[in-house]
Amino acid sequence: MRAGTVWHLGVKELWSLARDPMLLGLIAFSFTVSVYAGATAQPETLNKAPIAVVDYDRSPLSERITAAFYPPQFLPPARITPDEMDARMDAGRDTFALVVPPDFQRDVLAGRRPAVQLNVDATRMSQAYTGSGYVETITSGEVRAFADRYRANPAPPVDMAVRARFNPELNKSWFGAVVKLIDNVNLLAIALAGAALIRERERGTIEHLLVMPVTPFEIMTGKVWSMGLVVLFACALSLRVVVQGALGVPVGGSRALFLCGVALHLFAATSIGIFMGTFARSMPQFGLLLMMVVLPLQMLSGGVTPRESMPGWVQTVMLAAPTTHFVALSQGILYRGAGLSVVWPQFLALALIGTTFFGVTLARFRKVIGTMA
């Protein structure tokens, strides 16, 4: 391999990418708007859910319960009449409607167990599922606190001291931003490398390379380092400007160590992209193939769902995927501040998997090049 040849082939790929506005737009969107939206638009988070209260009791306890619902989980409760409740829910104006029965406070103080009715608009599935638990917890807590003030011998309080590590506020945007960044690194690495090969084939420039004194190894290496460099630079910029800057997500570990892990993962991911590009004959075919490969890699790598909750055979199979180890080292470094002494097994696994994928892809690439010669 001649280093100069590999360098010029990689520069050629960078110039080719610079003339493709669609791919440039995809890169910019993926590492800015996509990361920000993935962090702030968490569908499972209860945020400003509309709630109404039908208060038959009009007691200090019912007022206390009503006042306990406030932003950001809920909008300020609307005080409505029974006749308005069904109409408002039919119109989709309220997700929750809480009905406090008559003599509610008197029954609570007498030691009885009065029932409070909660009506839920279950068409808003994510809010309905999460919010019902919130409403039950808030209502029960307020009733318990109110009743303890009037008991002669209230039960001694027993509190559980919960300390959340790495994310004390349980802020889901911290998790969403990093996961989205990891997903986009994987997606763009595979897409750009595969598109680089498809672009050569569609424009006919691959035939020009075949008559030049270059080897398939040099051609492939030029594509790997150039496309990997683009994604690495975009990832570093997104981590600093979007994740840490715009979203204010703290990074627990070394950014340099994380970027080293990104570079190692890009070695494997770009090889996968070129391997896929040798099978696709056009960009539409490559796009369909991309969806079939990238989506399972993202869903089963441990970023969206913890690996421990997956079937055992899925966990075993996914150990052969570079994304599994990349997600593990990224979360260890960025969330927990892990050093190289902790994440070295993931680095080693990425190096072995990347070398294997590169070798398999090179063999396939040589075969394809041979049929075109």
Image (tube, helix red, strand yellow):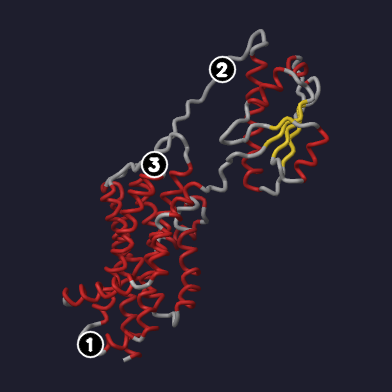
| In this rendering, position of residue 233 left or right of residue 108 | left
Q: Which mark is residue 248?
A: 3
| In this rendering, position of residue 66 left or right of residue 219 | right
- Mark 1 to mark 3 CA distance (whole Å): 50 Å
Location of residue 167 in the rendering, given as x and y in whole percent from the top left corner:
42, 38
State yes or no: discs 1 and 2 in contact (Cβ < 8 Å).
Answer: no
Query: Residue 94's quadrant in the figure?
Result: top right
Q: Nearer the viewer, mark 3 or mark 2?
A: 3
| Above/below status of 79 relative to 26 | above
Hey, which residue is sitting farthest top in the picture?
152
- Assess disc 3: are there few (<14), some (14-19) or many (≥20) residues with their C-alpha within 10 Å of its C-alpha: few
Hey, which residue is sitting farthest right in the picture?
83
Task: Looking at the image, tell me whether mark 1 or mark 3 is earlier in sequence order.
Answer: 1
State yes or no: discs 3 and 2 in contact (Cβ < 8 Å).
Answer: no
Which kind of residue does numbered mark 2 sit on? Pro
- Label 3 sits on a secondary structure element that is loop
Q: Which mark is residue 212?
A: 1
The residue positioned 22% from the left and 83% from the top of the image is 214
Q: Name the one closer to the observer, 161 or 277.
A: 277
